[in-house]
Every structure is written in structure tokens, then in C-alpha cells.
Image (cartoon, rainbow, N blue to C red):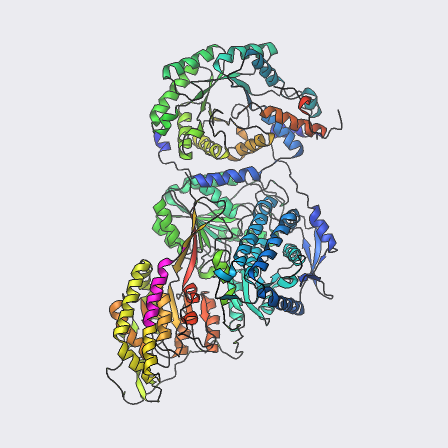
């Protein structure tokens, strides 16, 4: 017999049948670090950038604490160099046909395939995540993402005609993340022709490796640049001239702060905040499978964050028993072990869990921890928190509380009925992802449609695919990645000038629009009767303003055209309330029914054509042009009514039997501040898409001539249900302030001054409502592209992906 | 027992498929752990031959292999030669039970003989003859009886009738162990698999077994997950531990490790003993032996290095 390799332990293992270590060799990761002499810089313009005199941060194995390499921290000038490289690269990258970009992405996918072992061992080594998850999940998905977006790039000229790439994208990634978060965002950006500067947290080598792999492909070295540096560089990168969009992914409060600090800056901001997810377990569910869903969501290295678990009261005991039983079989250990469910995510993550658990316990909650988990420090056992009083500061239902459920914590709470579950689930400012577990199709769909989140999985959790858009709503931020929505994040309508900074340093946010200048009577109204309607159009009728005062409106020759009501904060409150009351009914209407009402309004406008035209004439328009404006307005109403008929579609996903529905849902109450010019056309062009998608609106009409909007209100009063569209006249800045700061306005469109735009962007940080601000740029409302283009449709609704796996 | 146990149950097919995929990837064992687990797997095997051309000579060879499943020198190298490693049982057609009992006696060991029965594999014969078949096999010396259920009762939802039939099988077995084959490939849905498992356990089966090996779809992980969950639920409700036997299509050593970890994950270590876990297989043993050979010697075995079964 030749050399025997059998160890001495077989006998004991034969009896105990325990699991042994399954170490994955990370020699190639270390060898790669050696090629950099264990000192990582930044990867800019296809070259390693290792400037001198920089602080360095050690990159450590999160479990052993062993020093793997030192990482140089970027300074402002390194950021500038990277942005400059990306700007130079953008010129040629965006000029090439999509097919060329597709080739580059495909080649990158192939390189990843060839060097995947290096990628997965490096990622697992430095992040501590289970290598199996990285190998079988992330690396495969990264390649799929590249392939999917290569296809999108190759068809860009036809499929995305009328859109052009934004420019240089600044990408900001959170401290604990998988390199996939970067892939989700760089793939669509690169595909459509943008170039990227990614700012990664200190000591994250995987993005650098990816940048190197991309850079070494040759012809386009500067399209993907990665610099590593501290969070203090975020505002520096974001305000770097040339950056057209900042995609931020990270914690809620940081995102909020960035929203404030970027108000009025050149770059647009896309936020993806928070990592928490939600799971609804009803009494008709396959409970064992739902428990696996909980494992996928929170007790594995798949999900990024913690989980709120809502369990129907009638199955509470059974579900808790199964959860606890399952927890006992989870294994945690070194990420590079091939047989663990959970790795470790470093000391900071561990502290967070401990603080959360202590806080919960002090509030009287029950905490259950189990599993085969090493007892030493960076490991956290899977944790199940129940009976947390709803009023305790760390309860997930507590609005605006400082606590987020951290990985790997699950906070379970009971509900009685599906209706209550929806109320509880929607009763938070967060709107990321959720899953519904129910074997009753009707109930599952009801919950799936009713949840205010970006992604809903029915009887599954955490599935992802490049063709399915992923994003959120409410305070989870409204940026999207994947699918068509991910592409539009980095596109703007062709011909739009590059965004410029409209930053006014001396704009005082505290006083902007705070006071309303008082207005005095300016003489009697003269001109054609009938007199314009007077009052604020709120809740379906004209109401006297709370301030009981009016403002004069002059015509183009300076004569008094009429008086309009002076609306104020209380009127805005009333209008938003009225809009909220009308919202469920309107959103629940079929697109056909909504179209019918828009068409009825169009017909009413045509009947009123002569009055409207004469009012436009008094504002200085030619009669022909005035009549044309009225006709075009009516056409816009009809066009949007018809367009919304064909909304949402079904996606087919590899590896999933069953459809994924891409739904387009209304945003809620939409505040619209109309431009001064085109008093009728702009008003109708904004009203039509907003209503067509099922939103209810509060509108501030043209300040120069609100009378036309009020004329339309007369028809809306007879055609529309009350509260659908509310029109408040008054001081523009004051009304803008009230709307922008209103926490229960779900989105805001602002067409007006640069200062107003800056204020709106700043104020939107309160509830992180998506805003669309014109920044003082006029818009050609009579042109199809700008007045009725697809951009309006995109902004008027939000996407939801509803996953419906099938099988029996 | 209460038939309401099965009325509310729901099994979500796609979710179980996902779990089945994950469970195979999430647990592996290497090196001496692998060797020890493989030897353990040997002790779970119901070494089976169910062919039309079975005669006493190949039954005899099978029985010898059951007694000496792994080459003695390999066991010595692992220091496992004194553990008395044999397969858990041999499993044959009723008409071959005599041969097997005789061969095992000649080999001087007390490995139990299992016999399939009740119109194996289709179960489409009269109840009377099916019961008689059990009695005859027991008379011939079989101590374990693998019965097939009447699939038509499941597909038409006659759960009480199914319960009554299995009760009668149980009675006919007397002292012998009753393993109930659910033929899951022909039950139509995972929900039916769960319900049939529950009925079989309520009616007094000692084991529930996935399949005959003669259906087009045999032992699969999704089906096993559902059956194991049913076993756990039954244990929680009654305190009785029922055994599990996957059969059909388990051919490689790697498969057998996955099955062991599946049972360990879903039910726990207390189910990992021959009284509660069996693997029905005919060719699996030789692959395990090859892997052990490789583990001990560091070389891959040639076909003729290991004795045939």
C-alpha cells in the first residue's frame, strides 16, 4: 500500500458526523495583492495611480485581522484626476456606436469568467462573506449583468432613440457592500455611453480589480475609474465639475445630507438608501418555505440588511417554532469556508447588532439567537427579535427612528388580517423590497399590488435578474438599476443641454419664500366679461383663500386683467389633503376610465376655446397662435389618455418559471409648479401625464397669468371627481416653499427660477421626494419632445417589479 | 390520528425547488470528513437488486458484498476495520427472499433481508393478493417489507381508504418493519407527497420511501425535502420518529453525501442512523468504494481493483 493520506480522525467523525472545514484556497488573491506589492492605489485611466504622501489604511481580513495590504487614501486632486480621465474618455466612448460598447462589455464578461476564482476568493477574503454565495451568486450575476447590458448597448440606437448619455457618473458605494452593487450601476451607465468614477470606501480591492480587468482590455482605459477614499471625499466628488450624475448607495441619513448639500449643484442625484427588507407571512403560506425565505433575506450572505417579519397571528406559534428550529442549523464561520451560511462582516457590523439587541432587550423584547457560530468577536449569530413594543425606539414601525434593523437581525411582529398587514407594512417611510408568502393567488396579488415598495416577490425572497428593474420608493430613494429603468437613470432626452450648476451660495433656505409680500387693490378689473373665476380650486370647488386677500394680475399691456386669490400655507395643506382623499379612488381607476375623463376635459377645453383664446390674446398672443395653443392643449390631454393604456409589461427571466410584472404605479400626490410662460399649454402638458398615470395633483399655475388655469378649473369642477386636481394661486416662492417642505407630497415638479429649483432640491431631503426642477431653463412646451416627450411619462409614475414564480 | 392534519397543508413548489438547489451547494465535506461520511453512508445502504433476471447466484454475490462492502485493507488504512461496517440490508423481490436469507446465513451475518411487496412496482393488483404477498415474504424470512401504495387512491383524494390499506399492510407485516413507498414521481404534486407521507406515517409505517426506482422520476431533493418536513411535523405532533428512505437514481458518492447532509439539515443528527435512514441503491456502493480507495491511496482505482457486486 502506498502512502496513506488518511487522517486519524475518521473514527470520531464516523460517530459524530460533524461538518469539517472546507477551506477555499485564497492563494491567487494573495498573489494578485503581491503584484501590487501589497499596496493598493487607485485605478485611473487604465493605470494604477499611486500618488505619494497619502495616508494609507490597512486592508484586513475581517476575521483574522491579518493585514493583507495597505490602501492609499485619495485626496481631492486624485478625485479631480479621475474625473478628468473619465471626461476625456466620455468623448470617444459616447461617440462610438452601441455595438462597440457592447463588445467591450462582452469582453469584460469573458475576462471575469476566465478569472473568476481570483474574483471570488478576493471578494470573500476581504469582505468576509461566504465564498459560496460570491462564487455561485455574485460572480455569475456580474457576468449576466454585463451580457444583458451589452445587448441593450447594441440596440441602443433604435430602442433608445431620442435619448443620449448624461456624461460622467460619480458612483458612491457604502462601506459594506458586495462588488455587485457596483456592477448593477456601472453596467447600465457604461452601456448607454456614460463613463464612471467610482468612489469606494477604504480597503475594498475588488472594485479596483474589476477596474483593472476592464482597463487592461485596451481601447477604452478611462471609462471605469476607481478611487478609494474616506466618506469626506463624497461632497468633493459630487461637486466636481463635469460630473453629471451622482449615484449614491448607502445609509439614509448620509443620503439625506448629500441631497441637501447637492441642491443647486451641477450633478443630478440618484439615491438608493437603506438595506432593510420586509417579509409578510400569511396563514395560507407554506410556512417552511417562508422560513427559507427569511433565511435568504437575513440569515445568509445574500441579503445586505436586516428584515422586518410580519406574521399572521393565527400561525405565529407555528412560524416561530420553525424559525427557531431552522436557526439552530445555520452555520457561521470564515467566509472562505465552503460550507458556511454566514460569514462575518467585520467588527463595526457586529457592534451594530449588539447595540440593537441591547436596546431591544431593554425595551422588553425577546431575543433568540442560535446556530453553529464561532464565539469569538466578529461573528454575529442569527438573531430573532420578537415582542418588541411598537413604541420602542428601535421598533421598525417607528417613523423616523434612528434605528435600522441590521444584518443578521429579524424583527418579528404579528398582524391580524391582510388589510392590517398592508397598513403596518406601508406605515413606515421605507420602501425598498418585500416578499409576500401566501398560497392564495388573490390575496398574494392584493398584497403585492398594495405594498408601497420597489420590488415584491410572491413566495420567494431576494431573487434578482439583470432584466428586472430594482429600486425603491419613499425614503429608500427612487433610483433604479437593472432593466429599462436602470438605463434611463443615465440618459437624458437628446438635445437637452448639459446640466449646469445653478448654485447660489447666498440663498437662505430658512427665509426663501417665507413671507408673502402684501398686495394692495390695484383698481377695478376692466376687459371682456365674464369676469375670471375667483378663488382657489381645492376639493372640486372654488374656495376663498385662508388669507382672505388677493393679488392683481396684469395683461401684456400692463392693465389689470383680474384678481386671483392669495393662497398660503393653510391652503396648501387643504389642497394636499383633498388630493390625498381623491387619490385611492383615482389610482384604482382603470387607465381606460382615466383616459375617458381626460378626453372629456379635452372636449370641454375645445368648447371654451374662444374664452381661452381671448384671454391668451390679452397676454399678448396672436389670435391664431392663441387658438393653436388651445387646440394643442386639448390634443395633449387626449394623447396622454391614450398613451397610458399600454402601460407596464411582463418580463421573462432566465431560471424563473413564471412572469415578472413591471408595473407603473402612480406616485401619489404630485405637486406641480408651472412655468410662467405658456400659461395654458404648460399647465395642461403637466396636468395630463400626472393625471393619466393615476396621480392626484396640487398645481401652482403660471404666476404671470393664472387666469387660464382657473378657466380650466371651471371645467375640471364639472368633469373630474373632487380633489383630483387642485389649483392654488398666490406667491410662487411661498407656495413652492410650502409644497417642497410638505412631508406628504410624494413628488414635485418645479418649473421656475434657479433659486427656486435649488430650494426645492434642498427641501426635498425631508421625505426624499423625487423632484424635477428646471433650474431656470425654459422649455419649448409646444415641441413634442419637450412638451409631451417620454420623459414626462417616466417622471409621472414609479416602477414596481412584481415577481410571480409559478409551479405546482 | 386526525385526518385534519393534512387538510390545510400547502407546499409551494418553486420555493421547495429553490431550497433543493441551495441545499446541495451549501454543505460539502472534504478529506477525512468525506471518508468518514462515505463509510457512514455505506451503513445506510439497502443494497438492492430488483431485476427480472435475478437468480440465486447473483443474490449470493450481492449478499457477500453487503457483508464486505469495502475492501478490508482500505478499512484498515482508515482504522475502521473493527467497526463492523456492512450495508444496512439487502433488498430483493419476494421470490428471492429465500436465496438471500440462505446466502446471508452462509456468510454468517445478521444483515436483515428486505423484500418489496404489494404488486411492486405498480401496486395495481388486488388487495387480497397484495396482502398475501407480504405474508409470504415474511414467512420466507424477510424482516423488512417495502410496500408500494396505491397511487390511484392519492390521485382521487381517497385518503381514508389509503390509510385503511396501509393499516392492513402494517398488520400483515407482523413483526417485520414496514417501509411505505410513495412513488412520488406519480403523485402529481408536492402537496400530495406531503399528504401521502402523513397518511403513511399515521397508518403505522416505520419508514417512508420516495420511489420504487421504476418510475421515470425517482428520488429527487424537492420531494425529499417535503417528506422530511412531513416526518418532522409528525414527530412534533406525536413524538414518534419515522425513518426516511430515498431510492432510485442515487448512484454517485457525491450524491450520497448530499443526501446525508440533507437529512442532517432538515431533521438533525438523531435521524442519521440505520434505524431511521436508508438509501436504496445498487451501484452506489461501488462508487463509494472507489472514492475511499482514492482517499486512502491518492490514486484513482481501475475497474478491476475493486470486487464487483
Name the dominant secondary structure of the magenta segment: helix
Q: Residue A85 versus residue A158: which sits nearer the camera?
A: A158
Residue B81 sits above or below residue A369 on the image: above
Q: Nearer the viewer, residue B112 or B57?
A: B57
**Magenta stretch: includes residue A644:** yes
Tell me which residue sits at (46%, 15%) in the image: B175
- Residue A479 visible in this rendered orientation of the protein: no
Is residue A244 on the magenta stretch? no
Is A628 left, or right, of A11 in this rendering? left
Residue B202 visible? The answer is yes
Quadrant holding the C terminus of chain B: top right
Residue B15, position in %: x, y? 46, 41
Q: What stretch is highlighted in magenta?
A: A633-648
* x, y percent for residue B136: 44, 11
Q: In which quarter of the image is residue A714?
A: bottom left
- Rendering coords of residue A86 (x, y %): 62, 66
Q: Nearer the viewer, residue A378 or A142?
A: A142
Number of on-image labels = 0
**Which quadrant of the figure contains the N terminus of chain B?**
top left
Using residue A562 as the reference point, say whether residue A109 is left or right of it. Answer: right
Check the image and report above or below for B139 versus A800. above
| Residue A707 falls left or right of residue A281 | left
Q: Does A190 sit above or below residue B265?
A: below
Q: Is residue A43 found left or right of A648 in the rendered image?
A: right
User: Where's residue A660, x and y in %?
Assistant: 43, 50
Q: State whether residue A456 is above or below residue B130.
A: below
Q: Which of B44 and B281 is in front in this view?
A: B281
Amino acid at each position: 500500500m502506498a502512502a496513506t493520506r488518511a487522517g486519524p480522525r475518521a473514527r470520531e467523525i464516523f460517530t459524530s458526523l460533524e461538518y469539517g472545514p472546507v477551506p477555499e484556497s485564497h492563494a491567487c488573491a494573495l498573489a494578485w495583492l503581491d503584484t501590487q506589492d501589497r499596496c493598493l492605489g487607485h485605478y485611473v485611466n487604465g493605470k494604477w495611480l499611486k500618488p505619494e504622501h497619502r495616508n494609507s489604511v490597512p486592508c484586513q481580513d475581517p476575521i483574522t485581522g491579518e493585514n493583507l495590504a495597505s490602501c492609499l487614501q485619495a485626496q481631492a486632486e486624485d478625485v479631480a484626476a479621475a474625473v478628468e480621465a473619465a471626461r476625456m474618455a466620455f468623448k470617444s466612448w459616447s461617440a462610438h456606436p452601441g455595438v462597440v460598447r457592447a463588445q467591450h462589455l462582452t469582453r469584460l464578461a469573458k475576462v471575469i469568467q476566465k478569472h473568476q476564482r481570483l474574483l471570488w476568493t478576493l471578494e470573500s477574503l476581504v469582505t468576509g462573506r461566504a465564498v459560496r454565495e460570491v462564487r455561485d451568486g455574485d460572480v455569475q450575476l456580474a457576468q449576466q449583468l454585463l451580457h444583458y447590458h451589452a445587448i441593450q448597448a447594441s440596440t441602443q440606437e433604435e430602442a433608445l432613440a431620442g435619448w443620449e448619455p448624461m456624461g460622467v457618473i460619480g458612483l458612491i458605494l457604502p462601506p459594506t457592500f458586495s462588488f455587485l452593487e457596483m456592477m448593477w450601476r456601472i453596467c447600465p451607465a457604461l452601456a448607454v455611453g456614460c463613463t464612471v468614477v467610482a468612489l469606494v470606501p477604504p480597503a475594498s480591492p475588488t472594485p479596483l480589480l474589476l477596474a483593472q480587468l476592464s482597463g487592461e482590455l485596451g481601447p477604452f482605459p478611462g471609462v471605469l475609474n476607481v478611487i478609494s477614499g474616506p466618506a469626506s471625499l463624497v461632497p468633493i466628488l459630487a461637486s466636481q465639475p463635469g460630473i453629471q450624475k451622482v449615484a449614491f448607495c448607502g445609509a439614509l441619513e448620509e443620503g439625506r445630507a448629500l441631497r441637501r448639500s447637492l441642491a443647486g449643484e451641477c450633478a443630478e442625484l440618484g439615491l438608493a438608501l437603506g438595506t432593510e427588507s420586509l417579509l409578510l407571512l400569511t396563514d395560507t403560506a407554506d410556512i417552511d418555505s417562508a422560513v427559507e425565505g427569511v433565511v435568504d433575506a437575513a440569515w445568509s450572505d445574500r441579503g445586505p440588511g436586516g428584515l422586518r417579519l410580519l406574521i399572521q397571528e393565527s400561525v405565529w406559534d407555528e412560524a416561530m417554532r420553525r424559525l427557531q428550529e431552522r436557526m439552530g442549523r445555520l452555520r457561521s464561520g470564515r467566509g472562505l469556508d465552503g460550507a458556511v451560511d454566514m460569514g462575518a462582516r467585520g467588527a463595526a457590523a457586529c457592534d451594530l447588532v449588539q447595540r440593537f439587541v441591547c436596546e431591544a432587550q431593554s425595551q422588553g423584547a425577546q431575543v433568540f439567537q442560535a446556530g453553529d457560530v464561532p464565539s469569538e468577536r466578529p461573528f454575529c449569530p442569527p438573531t430573532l427579535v420578537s415582542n418588541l413594543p411598537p413604541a420602542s425606539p428601535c421598533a421598525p414601525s417607528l417613523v423616523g427612528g434612528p434605528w435600522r434593523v441590521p444584518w443578521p437581525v429579524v424583527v418579528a411582529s404579528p398582524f391580524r388580517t391582510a388589510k392590517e398587514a398592508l397598513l403596518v407594512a406601508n406605515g413606515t417611510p421605507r420602501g425598498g423590497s418585500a416578499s409576500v408568502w401566501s398560497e392564495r393567488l388573490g390575496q398574494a396579488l392584493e398584497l403585492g399590488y398594495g405594498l408601497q415598495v420597489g420590488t415584491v416577490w410572491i413566495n420567494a425572497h431576494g431573487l434578482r435578474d439583470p432584466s428586472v428593474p430594482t429600486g425603491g420608493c419613499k425614503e429608500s430613494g427612487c433610483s433604479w438599476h437593472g432593466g429599462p429603468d436602470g438605463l434611463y437613470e443615465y440618459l437624458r432626452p437628446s438635445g437637452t443641454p448639459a446640466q449646469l450648476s445653478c448654485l447660489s451660495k447666498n440663498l437662505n433656505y430658512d427665509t426663501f419664500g417665507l413671507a408673502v409680500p402684501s398686495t394692495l387693490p390695484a383698481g377695478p378689473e376692466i376687459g371682456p366679461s365674464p369676469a375670471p373665476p375667483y378663488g382657489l380650486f381645492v376639493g372640486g370647488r372654488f374656495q376663498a383663500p385662508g388669507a382672505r386677500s388677493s393679488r392683481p394680475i396684469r395683461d401684456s399691456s400692463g392693465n389689470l386683467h383680474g384678481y386671483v386669490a392669495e393662497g398660503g400655507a393653510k391652503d396648501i395643506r387643504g389642497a394636499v389633503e383633498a388630493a390625498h382623499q381623491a387619490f385611492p379612488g383615482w389610482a384604482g381607476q382603470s387607465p381606460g376610465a382615466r383616459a375617458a375623463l381626460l378626453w372629456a376635459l379635452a372636449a370641454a377645453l375645445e368648447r371654451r376655446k374662444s374664452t381661452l383664446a381671448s384671454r391668451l390674446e390679452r397676454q399678448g398672443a396672436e389670435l391664431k397662435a392663441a387658438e393653436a395653443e388651445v387646440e394643442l392643449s386639448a390634443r395633449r390631454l387626449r394623447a396622454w389618455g391614450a398613451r397610458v393604456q399600454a402601460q407596464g409589461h411582463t418580463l421573462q427571466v432566465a431560471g424563473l418559471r413564471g412572469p415578472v410584472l413591471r408595473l407603473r404605479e402612480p406616485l401619489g400626490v404630485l405637486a406641480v409648479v408651472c412655468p410662467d410662460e405658456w400659461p395654458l399649454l404648460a399647465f395642461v402638458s403637466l396636468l395630463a401625464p400626472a393625471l393619466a398615470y393615476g396621480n392626484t395633483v396640487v398645481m401652482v399655475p403660471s404666476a404671470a397669468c393664472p387666469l387660464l388655469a382657473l378657466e380650466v378649473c371651471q371645467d375640471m369642477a364639472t368633469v373630474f371627481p373632487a380633489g383630483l386636481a387642485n389649483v392654488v394661486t398666490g406667491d410662487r416662492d411661498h407656495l413652492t416653499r410650502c409644497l417642497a417642505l410638505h412631508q406628504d407630497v410624494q413628488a414635485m415638479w418645479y418649473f421656475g427660477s434657479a433659486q427656486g429649483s435649488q430650494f426645492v432640491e434642498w427641501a426635498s431631503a425631508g421625505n426624499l421626494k423625487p423632484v424635477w426642477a428646471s433650474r431656470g431653463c425654459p422649455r419649448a412646451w409646444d415641441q413634442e419632445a419637450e412638451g409631451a416627450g417620454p420623459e414626462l411619462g417616466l417622471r409621472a409614475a414609479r416602477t414596481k417589479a412584481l415577481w410571480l414564480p409559478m409551479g405546482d | 390520528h386526525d385526518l385534519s392534519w393534512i387538510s390545510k397543508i400547502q407546499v409551494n413548489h418553486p420555493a421547495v425547488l429553490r431550497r433543493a438547489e441551495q441545499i446541495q451547494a451549501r454543505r460539502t465535506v472534504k478529506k477525512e470528513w468525506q471518508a468518514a461520511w462515505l463509510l457512514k453512508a455505506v451503513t445506510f445502504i439497502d443494497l438492492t437488486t430488483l431485476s427480472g433476471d435475478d437468480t440465486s447466484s447473483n443474490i449470493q454475490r450481492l449478499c457477500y458484498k453487503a457483508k464486505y462492502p469495502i475492501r478490508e485493507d482500505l478499512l484498515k488504512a482508515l482504522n475502521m476495520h473493527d467497526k463492523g461496517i456492512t450495508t444496512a440490508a439487502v433488498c430483493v423481490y419476494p421470490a428471492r427472499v429465500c436465496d438471500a436469507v440462505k446466502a446471508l446465513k452462509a456468510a454468517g451475518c445478521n444483515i436483515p433481508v428486505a423484500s418489496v411487496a404489494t404488486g411492486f412496482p405498480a401496486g395495481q393488483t388486488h388487495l387480497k393478493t397484495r396482502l398475501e404477498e407480504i405474508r409470504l415474504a415474511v414467512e420466507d424470512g424477510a424482516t423488512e417489507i417495502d410496500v408500494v401504495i396505491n397511487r390511484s387512491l392519492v390521485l382521487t383524494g381517497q385518503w381514508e381508504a389509503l390509510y385503511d390499506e396501509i393499516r392492513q399492510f402494517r398488520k400483515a407485516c407482523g413483526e417485520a418493519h414496514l417501509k411505505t413507498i410513495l412513488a412520488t414521481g406519480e403523485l402529481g404534486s408536492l402537496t400530495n407527497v406531503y399528504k401521502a407521507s402523513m397518511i403513511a406515517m399515521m397508518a403505522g409505517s416505520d419508514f417512508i420511501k420516495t420511489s420504487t426506482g421504476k418510475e421515470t422520476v425517482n428520488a429527487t431533493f424537492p420531494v425529499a425535502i417535503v417528506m422530511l418536513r412531513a416526518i418532522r411535523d409528525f414527530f412534533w405532533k406525536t413524538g414518534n420518529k419515522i425513518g426516511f428512505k430515498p431510492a432510485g437514481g442515487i448512484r454517485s458518492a457525491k450524491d450520497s453525501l448530499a443526501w446525508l447532509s440533507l437529512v442532517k439539515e432538515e431533521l438533525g443528527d438523531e435521524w442519521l442512523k440505520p434505524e431511521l435512514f436508508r438509501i436504496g441503491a445498487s451501484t452506489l456502493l461501488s462508487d463509494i468504494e472507489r472514492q475511499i480507495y482514492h482517499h486512502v491511496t491518492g490514486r484513482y482505482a481501475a475497474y478491476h481493483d475493486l470486487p464487483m457486486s
